[in-house]
Structures are given as C-alpha cells and as structure tokens.
Image: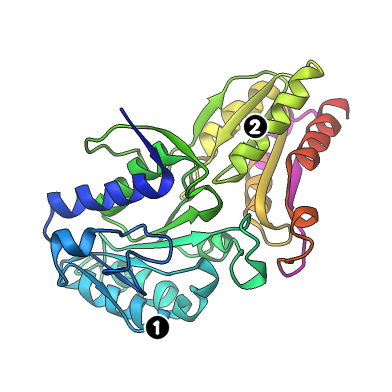
C-alpha cells in the first residue's frame, strides 16, 4: 500500500470518484488551478478540466445553493467550504434546503450525492475564526449525515462512501492532521460504511470515545492510564449523524464506564447527546457517572490554545476519576 498523508488520501479519493463517475464535480474558493488553500484538490482541474473542478465567488451561501441546484439535477457536487468557521453563512441553505429536499418532495426529488467538505478544528494556531468544531450544529438536523475521519485510510474510505451515499453529507476534515497524519492507504477504490463506529482497541475497565483529531489525544491518555493498570476500550465514532449508539452501548455494558472527548465546547456539544442516550440504554450497567472532556465554553483562543484544548492530561484525569469513583 502507498504511504499517504490525509491531504493526499483526500485528493486520491476525489481523483478516483471523478474518474469513476462523470457527474462528480468539485468546486469552492480557490479549489481550481491553485488546488485549494490546503491543496486538497491539487491537479484535479488539470486532469478533469475547468467544467469539473472550478473556483467559485467568495460566498458560502452561494456555494451551498449552487451545490443544491446541481445535486437536484442529478450531479454529484463535492463543494468545499474553505474553513468550517465560514460554513455559517451557508447554514440556511444546508439546514433548510439540503437536509429537507427529499422530505418536502415526498421522495420525488432529492440532493443525494451532495458532499460538503470542510477543514475543521484547532491545532494550527488559527484563532477563533479558523479553529471551530461545528459538528453539533448539524447533528441537530434530520436529513444530513455528518462524518469525521481520524487518519488517511479512514479519510479516503469515508469520503468515497460519502460521495456514493444517497444522502447529503457534511464531511469535516481535521486540518491539524492534514500533513501530520501519515499511514498506509490502498491506492484502489474502497468505501468505509457510514454511520458505523469502530472499536480501535479492546479493553475491560472503561470505554473512551472520540472522533477526528481527538483520537490521537485520547490514545495518549489511554497509554498513560494503562501504565496505572487501567484497561481501556477505545472507540472512534467516525459518524456523528447518524451515530452508532449500539456499538457504544455494547462497549459500555462491558466496561461499565464511559469517557467522551471532543474538541468543541462542552455546553450543547455532541457529547451531551451521547451521554444522555447511553445513560438511557446502559443505566443499570454504569459503575460511575459518564465523563465529558471537551473544549471550554469560550471563543477559541489564540494565545491560550493549549489551555483550551481537551488534551491527553485532562482525558487521563477523567479516565482515572471514572475508574476510582
């Protein structure tokens, strides 16, 4: 298998999808000859032409509306929102149009095959306009899928599955990992099932759950806990909407404990939804309160980024609190 970083894996996925299906098109701000601000669409315009990979004006609402129109006519647009922090001008189009297209027509028409790609999260000293994690906003919206990969292999397989999905997908890419995460990735086409969590490590004392770039962080915490004799089961949620409650519940029934880590702020974060559901499904199995390790309820700070992040030390402390309760 080839060695790829996450950007190369995403670029490879887009290349394969465009080669496989002429209806797949890529567009967004600077995605054409420039290849996007992170170069995720590099060389695609040269290979497939300006009709299939092209720049748009600087208007996220326009990008989303244009994507809806193309998808409604049978195309498979992969629209890039340059930073997830700037997806909010497109919020109305995504939540009120993209998500409801099939429902409001009684399944007569839809925008399946539409994917919004967007770099999200912190770790690059981007400050409060280039570091947000907005997945919980969209998880509240029936009709969407929300997917977040943790490494290059996952990024390629999940993105190809998103493009092939009959439902519109928001695909958040942890920009912290774009060049930092390198791994073996098959060069051929493959898909990873959407809506299915992955147990990345078996354990018996506590379940530790995360997604995206936070998986690397919780792994460090788990290694610290294991030196103290604590056996951790680790789960990558991968899909936020729909999310795989059954896999998480099965693990918690075995371990009796759950620690959830995410980068977004605590209040209204998706960890709250997970905690409520697992409490309901696993109440008689729980040995301690469910722990949430999240970002702070403040704008994402520039100077204090390290203090803000739900890091491995905070996660380790939560694991130990849970097992010692």
Is 70 colored magenta in this rendering?
A: no
Question: Is residue 278 visible from the viewing direction of this image?
Answer: yes
Quadrant in the picture for the N terminus:
top left
Residue 266 position (above or below residue 289): below
Mark 2 near mark 1, Cβ–Cβ under 8 Å? no
Q: Secondary structure at mark 2?
A: helix
Q: Residue furthest right?
A: 325
Q: Residue at x 35, y 47 (%)?
A: 8
Give left or right: position of 56 versus 117. left
User: Would residue 263 appear left or right of 191 to someone viewing this image?
Assistant: right
Instruction: Answer with left or right where residue 116 lies relative to residue 43.
Output: right
Residue at 27 percent across and 53 percent down: it is 163
Work out whether residue 19 or residue 30 is closer to the camera in this orientation and state it: 30
Chain part drawn in magenta: 279-299
Q: Is residue 281 magenta?
A: yes
Quadrant in which residue 49 is drawn: bottom left
Query: Percent position (x, y) of residue 246?
Result: 52, 35
Categorize mark 1 by other alpha carbons within 10 Å: few (<14), some (14-19), many (20+). Answer: few
User: Between tags 2 and 1, which lies in front?
Assistant: 1
Gap in Å between the C-alphas at discs 2 and 1?
38 Å
Query: What is the x, y in percent for residue 114?
Result: 29, 63
Q: Position of residue 134 (x, y in %)?
A: 57, 64
Q: Which residue is mark 2?
A: 219
In the depicted structure, whether residue 175 falls above or below residue 244: below
The residue carrying mark 1 is: 58
Q: Classify 10 Å Cα crowding around label 2: few (below 14), some (14-19), many (20 and above).
A: many
Quadrant position of the C terminus in the picture: top right
Kindly identify the residue that appears in the image at 42 percent across and 69 percent down: 81
**Which quarter of the picture shows residue 154?**
top left
Residue 159 percent location from the top left of the image: 34, 49
Q: Is residue 232 above or below residue 161?
A: above
Mark 2 vs 1, N-terminal side: 1
């Amino acid at each position: 298998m080839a060695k790829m970083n996450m950007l190369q894996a995403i670029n490879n996925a887009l290349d394969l999808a465009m080669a496989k299906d002429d209806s797949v098109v890529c567009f967004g701000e600077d995605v054409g000859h420039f290849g996007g601000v992170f170069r995720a669409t590099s060389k695609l315009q040269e290979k497939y032409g300006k009709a299939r990979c092209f720049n748009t004006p600087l208007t996220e609402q326009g990008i989303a509306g244009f994507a809806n129109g193309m998808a409604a006519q049978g195309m498979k647009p992969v629209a890039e929102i340059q930073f997830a922090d700037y997806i909010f001008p497109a919020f109305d189009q995504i939540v009120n149009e993209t998500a409801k297209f099939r429902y409001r027509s009684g399944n007569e028409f839809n925008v399946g095959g539409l994917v919004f790609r967007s770099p999200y999260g912190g770790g690059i000293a981007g400050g409060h306009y280039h570091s947000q994690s907005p997945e919980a906003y969209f998880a509240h919206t029936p009709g969407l899928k929300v997917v977040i990969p943790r490494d290059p292999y996952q990024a390629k397989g999940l993105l190809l599955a998103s493009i092939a999905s009959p439902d519109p997908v928001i695909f958040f890419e942890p920009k912290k990992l774009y060049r930092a995460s390198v791994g073996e990735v098959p060069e051929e086409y493959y898909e990873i099932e959407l809506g299915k969590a992955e147990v990345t490590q078996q354990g018996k004392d506590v379940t530790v759950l995360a997604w995206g770039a936070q998986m690397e962080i919780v792994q460090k915490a788990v290694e610290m806990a294991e030196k103290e004799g604590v056996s951790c089961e680790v789960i990558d949620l991968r899909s936020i909407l729909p999310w795989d409650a059954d896999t998480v519940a099965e693990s918690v029934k075995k371990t009796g404990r759950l620690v959830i880590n995410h980068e977004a702020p605590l209040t209204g974060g998706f960890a709250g939804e997970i905690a409520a559901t697992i409490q309901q499904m696993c109440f008689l199995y729980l040995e301690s309160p469910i722990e949430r390790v999240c970002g702070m309820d403040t704008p994402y700070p520039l100077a204090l980024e390290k203090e803000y992040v739900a890091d491995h030390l905070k996660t380790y402390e939560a694991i130990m609190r849970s097992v010692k309760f």
